[in-house]
Amino acid sequence: MAAHDQLIVAAVLVAAGDGVRLGADVPKAFVEVAGRTLLEHAVARFATHPAVRDVVVAAPAATLDRAGSLAPGATVVAGGADRQSSVSCGLAAVAEDVDLVLVHDVARAFVPPDVLTRVVDALSDGADAVVPTVPVSDTIRSVDAETGDLGGLVDRAQLTAMQTPQGFRKDVLVRAHAAGAGVRATDDAALVEALGVRVRAVAGDERAFKVTHPLDLALAEVVARG
């Protein structure tokens, strides 16, 4: 393991999803799995990790009191209108002495601690930006969006699926968000790449799946109960 005890790590957890695709009547972060909200499951992964000192939660503005009660010890701030602005709000609340920032989607509430460790270790080894990824297992083909006609096969050996937490040197992430203000990016790695910064991949984990649809909740119940 890399020696990262001199580097101060903060995690920004984005909890602004509306839960519509889940069919929930509460924001996604407050949906319960195995008796605890997704927010509680996610915060616990970071608050108990030995490399992480600070946790910042960016939650919907109307839910700050509720989020604060579920994430004791975390700094809770109001998120923005979309994920990118929510990360920016969370980043603004990160302490000045922090060296590394992990950005994580609360919807990936069951990310194993080993994934956090791999991201932090890669940053400690000199990477400016790190993303956990998993191999693509499905057969992939292109498709004509207008006609629906299938195109050629895509070599899945050259593809990888992105997960979170994405990790960054704080100064790099701050510059990326400043430069990308007003530009819609798919994630923070894309903002950083726009600066010309290389992003390193490390192994993710299937348990860091994103809870998006009702079927994902059934899987989450299994994972949460071990």
Image (cartoon, helix red, strand yellow):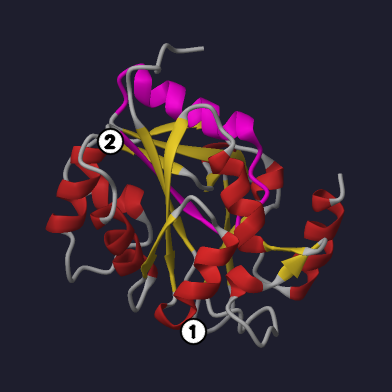
Instruction: Kindly indicate whether the residue at mark 1 contacts the one at mark 2 (C-beta within 8 angstroms).
Output: no
| Residue displayed at 62% across by 33% down | 113
Task: Give neighbour class at mark 2: few <14, some 14-19, many 20+ (Cα, 10 Å).
Answer: some
Amino acid tagged 2: Val
- Residue 22 lies in quadrant: bottom right
Give the CA distance from mark 2 to mark 1: 48 Å
Amino acid tagged 1: Glu
Placement of 7 over or under 31, stated as above or below? above
Left or right of residue 50, residue 220 in this image: right
The furthest residue to the bottom: 25
Q: Disc 2 on helix, strand or loop? A: loop
- Residue 123 lies in quadrant: top left
Q: Is residue 155 magenta?
A: no
Q: Nearer the viewer, residue 83 or 136?
A: 83
Q: Position of residue 135 (x, y in %)?
A: 62, 40
| Residue displayed at 39% across by 18% down | 4
Left or right of residue 223, residue 128 in this image: left
The span picked out in magenta is 100-127
| Residue displayed at 79% across by 69% down | 215
Residue 193 in sight in this render = no
Q: Which mark is residue 146?
A: 1
Left or right of residue 205, residue 184 in this image: left
Q: Quadrant of the C terminus?
A: top right
Placement of 90 over or under 162, stated as above or below? below
Q: Disc 1 on helix, strand or loop? A: loop
| Residue displayed at 60% across by 52% down | 42
Earlier sequence position, callout 2 versus callout 1: 2
Q: Which mark is residue 138?
A: none
Q: Which mark is residue 98?
A: 2
Left or right of residue 212, residue 6 in this image: left
Residue 104 in sight in this render = yes
